[in-house]
Amino acid sequence: MTDDAERLLSETATAWGFALSERQLAQFRRYLDELITWNDRFNLTAVRDRVAMVRRHLLDSLWLARDWQTQPASLLDIGSGAGFPALPLKILYPALPVTLVEATGKKAEFLRHIADCLELSAVRVLNERIETVGHNPAEREHYEVVTARAVAELRVLVEYALPLLRIGGRLLAPKGRDPAAEISAARNALTLLGGEISYCEAVDIPGEEQRSLVIVTKIAPTPDRFPRAVGVPARRPL
């Protein structure tokens, strides 16, 4: 990480109430080093500049923890890709148990590699489709927080996420500047699946266009038939 990139990360995190230790900064530095190396082979991110990586990947991930009063008991990330937002949150909260779900084998390989490089404990990588994970009794209705970034529109995403959340658990879904149409389209799915929109907040990252974060809370059990078979939620949204 360049001096400018590390300064941006450290100063912004501190302004948000996260004082990063030297070990955490070293982990973030190694994360970007490995991401750049692997990116030449697997195209994990279109972002190449380190300062831009800090803004678009690291700070965008850390924003999700701004309203946490305490560390969640568990977190599952859908479509983890290069590990955002879950692994920056894991670096921020080293004791947080994290499950990463990634259907693409090469990306799952990178996730296992980076967790090992950064010496992160209590990180599981599931190389499976999320619809399959949602019907696994060991995973279903288990998690306090589910995250998903750039995975699907909201009405599809809630079918992936709500079966995995315990009652009172929350889906944190980063979205674009104005997700009003997505929220409106997801009303039927939320009713069927036992969720409700808690709120939608503006996300302000230095040097980036304003985006939003949609928070969905699970308020009732999800019927056993959800999620539907692999591929169906995306082809035929509720």
Image (spheres, grey):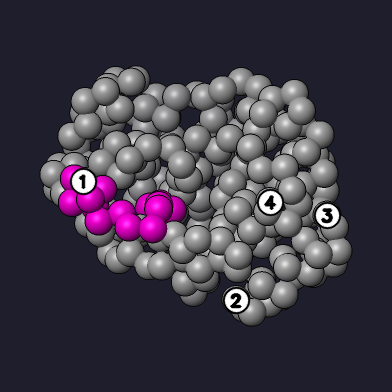
Task: Report the side of 147 relative to 181 (left or right).
Answer: right
Label 1, label 4: how far apart the Cα atoms are: 31 Å
Circle nearer the N terminus (2, 4): 2
Q: Residues within 10 Å of mark 3 (few under 14, many from 20)?
A: many
Residue wearing tag 4? 53
Please tell me which residue lies in front, 188 or 153: 153
Residue that appears at 68% across and 51% down:
53
Residue that appears at 64% across and 79% down:
15
Residue wearing tag 2? 16
Q: Which residues are magenta?
A: 168-185
Please name the amino acid that badge 2 sits on.
Trp
Please tell me which residue lies in front, 171 or 11: 11
Residue wearing tag 3? 1
Q: Residues within 10 Å of mark 2 (few under 14, many from 20)?
A: few
Task: Tell me, yes or no, if residue 168 can be seen here.
Answer: no
Circle nearer the N terminus (1, 3): 3
Q: Residues within 10 Å of mark 1 (few under 14, many from 20)?
A: many
Please tell me which residue lies in front, 89 or 35: 35
Residue that appears at 72% across and 42% down:
48
Relative to 99, does residue 213 appear above or below in the rendering? below
Q: In what element is the residue under mark 3?
A: loop
